[in-house]
Every structure is written in C-alpha cells, then in structure tokens.
Amino acid sequence: MNDKTPPEPSAAQLAEQGSRYWKKNITILSCILVVWFTVSFGCGILFRDWLDVNFPKVGSAPFGFWMAQQGSIISFILLLLAYSFLMNRLDKSSGYVSLEKNQ
C-alpha cells in the first residue's frame, strides 16, 4: 500500500507554529482591549462632555451619558462577538480543532 500521509511536523516546527499562534492571539486581544478601554473610559469619562456637544441626543439623554450607560454595554457585546469570530478564524487557520460539530 502506498499511503500518502504527510510527515509529522518536527518539534521545532510545532514550537514555531505555536509561537505564531500566540503572537496573533495577543494581537487580537490587545486590539480588543484598546477598543474596550476607549469605549468604557474614554466615552464614559474623558470624552463625555465633547460627545454631549458634538453628537445628537439619543432619546432625551445626551450622547456622552448614553455611551456611558447603554452604548458601552452594546459595545461590549459587539466586542465579545468579534473576539469569538476572530479566534475561531485563527484556530481554523492554525489547524486547531474547533469544539463545534462538523456535519
């Protein structure tokens, strides 16, 4: 029988692949944390007055107040979805098995 299975990667190749995976993982996580900080601290505290003046009201609340109360929650949910999507894509491209069932 002529079985054409690919050869097993060496320990050095596995280490290099793991290193690339973690670098990309840290990059994704860093970007998400920067957005999280900007939305929570920036929009809620630092830029609140500027947002109130330069953006329209949301309902009867000034935009800066709305971002601190409701907009940050919506942003956090969007960040969770983005993190899940990006990490699933990174896992697939790196060859890691997903927990989802492939049918």
Image: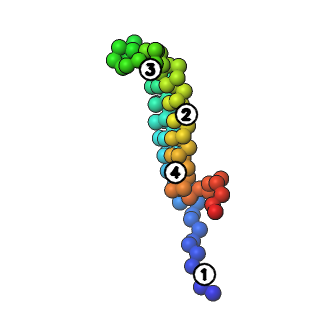
Q: Residue at x 43, y 15 (%)?
A: 62
Q: Is residue 58 toward the left or the right of residue 13 in the image?
A: left
Mark 3 or mark 1, which is nearer the start of the sequence? 1
Between marks 1 and 2, how big is the CA–CA gap? 48 Å
Image quadrant holding the N terminus, namely: bottom right
Mark 3 or mark 2, which is nearer the start of the sequence? 3
Mark 2 or mark 4, which is nearer the start of the sequence? 2
Q: Which residue type does callout 1 highlight?
A: Asp
Mark 3 or mark 4, which is nearer the start of the sequence? 3
Between marks 4 and 2, how big is the CA–CA gap? 20 Å
Viewer can see residue 12? no
Kindly identify which residue carries mark 4: 90
Kindly identify which residue carries mark 1: 3
Kindly identify which residue carries mark 2: 77
Q: Which residue type does callout 4 highlight?
A: Leu
- Residue 58 image label: 3
Between marks 4 and 3, how big is the CA–CA gap? 37 Å
> Which dot, 4 or 2, sits closer to the camera?
2
Between 42 and 77, the one lying in front of the other is 77
Extreme-left residue of the structure: 54
> Which dot, 1 or 4, sits closer to the camera?
4
> Which dot, 2 or 3, sits closer to the camera?
3
Q: Which residue type does callout 3 highlight?
A: Val
Mark 4 or mark 1, which is nearer the start of the sequence? 1
Q: Residue at x 64, y 63 (%)?
A: 103
Q: Quadrant of residue 6?
A: bottom right
